[in-house]
Image (tube, grey):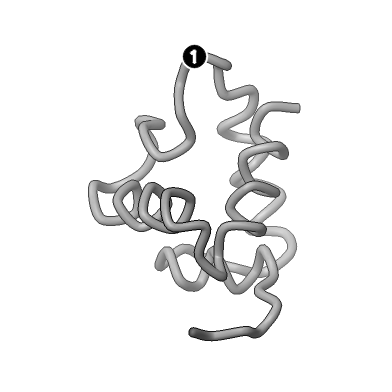
């Protein structure tokens, strides 16, 4: 298990998305607010592979789960 502390930039890179600070902020601004009834992994802007990764990380409370939670909160604000 990877015990490193992942950042939002790392998560975006893992998802295959541009990951500069400006890219992350633009993504969040473009997709916010995500309706409460839509689970993060089921949001329409993810590819099936991205959604599956997010779903698995949260389900397994894996090392990426904390930063995935942070993204979820940022998209709901």
Compared across the picture, whether 6 is left or right of 63 comes to right
Residue at image position (45%, 21%) is 38
Towards the viewer: 25 or 2? 2
Rendered position, 51 above or below 19: above
The residue carrying mark 1 is 37
**Depicted 61 relative to depicted 74: above or below:** below
Quarter of image, res 50:
bottom left
Q: Residues within 10 Å of mark 1 (few under 14, many from 20)?
A: few
Q: Residue furthest left?
A: 48
Residue drawn at the location 60% of the way across and 73% of the way down: 10
Residue 64 place in picture, x, y as percent? 55, 65
Q: Nearer the viewer, residue 11 or 69?
A: 69
Q: Position of residue 75 (x, y in %)?
A: 65, 34
Does residue 73 appear left or right of residue 44 in this picture? right
Task: Check the image and report above or below for 20 versus 65.
Answer: below
Where residue 48 appears, as percent x and y from the top left, is: 23, 47
Would residue 49 be found to the left or right of residue 26 on screen? left
Q: Count every numbered label the image shows and give the total.
A: 1
> For the residue labelled by badge 1, is the local secondary structure a helix, a strand or a loop?
loop
Task: Name the spot of residue 33 as percent of width and height, x first.
Answer: 64, 22
Which residue does the image show at 67% across and 27% down from the upper left?
76
- The residue located at (72%, 39%) in the rendering is 74
Quadrant of the drawing holding the C terminus: top right
């Amino acid at each position: 298990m990877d015990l490193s502390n992942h950042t939002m930039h790392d998560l975006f890179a893992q998802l295959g998305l541009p990951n500069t600070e400006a890219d992350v902020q633009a993504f969040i601004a473009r997709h916010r607010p995500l309706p409460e009834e839509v689970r993060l992994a089921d949001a329409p802007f993810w590819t099936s592979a991205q959604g599956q990764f997010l779903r698995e990380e949260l389900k397994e409370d894996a090392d990426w789960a904390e930063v995935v939670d942070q993204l979820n909160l940022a998209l709901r604000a």
